Amino acid sequence: MFTGIIESLGVVHQLDQEGGNLHISINSAITPALKIDQSVAHNGVCLTVVSISGDTYTVTAIEETLQKTNLGELQVGDKINLERAMILGSRLDGHIVQGHVDQTGKCIAVVEKDGSWFFTFEYGTAHNNVTIEKGSITIDGVSLTVVNSGKNTFSVAIIPYTYEHTRFNTYKVGSAVNLEFDVIGKYVARLMHL
């Protein structure tokens, strides 16, 4: 379980394909605090730490994860949003985030407005996911509030701190992102389609 508050940015150090699996090695300031078998969200995808060496740790994404997320598009040198699992009993600063990506989306607009940014994303209809204004959405692991919701599109407002400390400063029109929709909204959507 995660909060969607990004703890650190990592940098992809190495990518090793093994069959359908991709081993992703990441340099990060949080590496010394990690241990093997620990869950860490990578662009919102919950993956298990399988090895640690100095300031670099490795996780493995299976073929299904690569097909449903943007992790298969990573290149050496790319930044990646990181969050360790929340500690039970601590303050929940973001939203409830499971680290289970529902689907990918695509950035279709970036507008800078008086020191903040508005990003608009679109997503496919096959999974019956929905957003609502003032509801939550998780984009590459960043838990945000929807400010504008349309049919298969939504917008979020990004403050300078989030822009500077997450991958949002790398997004442009066409960028693929991982989306985790609000867990309560997913249950409601499922019940409506039964």
Image (tube, helix red, strand yellow):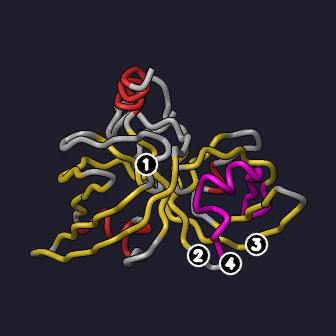
Residue 68 at x, y percent in the picture: 61, 52
In magenta segment, residue 61 = yes
Q: Earlier in the sequence, mark 2 or mark 1?
A: 2
Pick the front one: 100 or 23? 100
C-alpha gap between disc 2 and disc 1 = 29 Å
Q: Mark 4 sits on what residue?
A: 76
Asked if the residues shown at circle 4 and circle 2 are in contact, with their CB atoms under 8 angstroms apart, the answer is yes
Numbered range of the magenta stretch: 52-75
Whole-number angstrom distance, CA of label 3 to CA of label 4: 6 Å
**Residue pointed to by mark 2:** 78
Residue 21 locus on image (x, y percent): 82, 56
Report the residue at 58% width, 49% height from top: 45
Amino acid on which disc 2 is placed:
Asp
- The secondary element bearing badge 3 is classed as strand
Asked whether the residues under the numbered discs 3 and 4 touch, taking CB atoms below 8 Å apart as contact, a structural biologist would say: yes
Which is nearer the N-term, disc 1 or disc 3? 3
Find disc 1 in the rendering and name its residue. 125
Question: Of marks 2 and 3, which one's residue comes earlier in the chain?
Answer: 3
Of marks 1 and 4, which one's residue comes earlier in the chain? 4
The residue to which callout 3 is attached is 14
Task: Describe the element under mark 1 as helix, strand or loop.
Answer: loop
Label 4 Cα neighbours within 10 Å, binned few <14 / some 14-19 / many ≥20: few
Nearer to the camera, 60 or 123: 123
How far apart are the alpha carbons under marks 1 and 3?
A: 34 Å
